[in-house]
Amino acid sequence: MTAQTGATTERSSHSEESSLASLDVTRLYQEGLIAGLVGAATVALWFLIIDSIQGRPFYTPTILGAALFHRGAAPWLDAVPNLEMVLMFTWVHGLAFVVIGVVVARLLALAERQQNVGFGILMLFVFFEFGFIAAAMLFAAPVLQALAWPAILVANLLAATAMGGFFWLRHPNLRVQP
């Protein structure tokens, strides 16, 4: 004859809750990673199309990579596509988008639990989008003169739309309330 206590069930229940929480966190990071890669790929594809139409493929990532890694020089004056700069910038750009994707995934998880937070998240997005444009105009004016700043604005909006579409597919029941 054996006597069963609630201790085993309690421990099992606790480990199941821990496993579910771990799966949720893993799902959030996976979702953010994928969304970030979708956004980065959207921007990269946009600029590949724009640069190719202008007859200078990989011009934009070459210029941005040179501006990021070779400070003080004006590399856009006589830039030719440089695979090293393209790869270095693409790596940094992809990482930045993955970080943004993970942050947005976590914020959306919060908005699913508390619907009134969603509007604040939307306003935060708008603030950061315009903040990015203002900072770029202020600190990177020479680079923006070499590149068409409307193309950069369109790239950001395309990336936001692509990432937003991905998140919308993953969270179809998400509701935002002011």
Image (cartoon, helix red, strand yellow):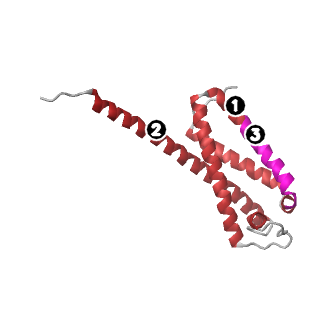
Q: CA distance from mark 3 to mark 2?
A: 31 Å
Query: Which of the labelled discs sits on residue 126, or is there none?
Result: 3
Question: Residue 46, how many percent across, how many down?
Answer: 72, 57
Instruction: Report the Cα–Cα distance between label 1 and label 2.
Output: 26 Å
- Element at label 2: helix
Q: Helix, strand or loop at disc 3?
A: helix
* Residue at mark 1 to residue at mark 3: CA–CA distance: 11 Å
**Earlier residue among tags 3 and 2:** 2
Query: Which kind of residue does numbered mark 1 sit on?
Result: Phe
Residue 116, x across and y down, in percent: 65, 26
Q: Kindly give the residue lying farthest to the left in the view shown.
A: 1
Q: Residue at x 33, y 34 (%)?
A: 11
Q: Main secondary structure of the magenta part?
A: helix
Instruction: Say which amino acid is labelled 2.
Output: Ala
Q: Which mark is residue 127?
A: none
Query: Label 2: few (<14), some or many (≥20) within 10 Å?
Result: few
The residue under label 1 is 119
Pick the quarter of the image with the C terminus. top right
N-term mark: 1 or 3:
1
Residue 118: x and y in percent read 66, 31
Q: Is residue 10 magenta?
A: no
Report the magenta residues as a range. Answer: 123-142
Q: Does 33 appear above or below 62?
A: above
Q: Mark 2 — residue?
A: 21
* Secondary element at tag 1: helix
10 Å crowding of disc 3: few (<14), some (14-19), many (20+): few
Left or right: 84, with 136 as reference point: left
Check disc 3 and give the amino acid type.
Answer: Val
Mark 1 vs mark 2: in front = 2
Q: Is residue 18 above or below residue 136?
A: above
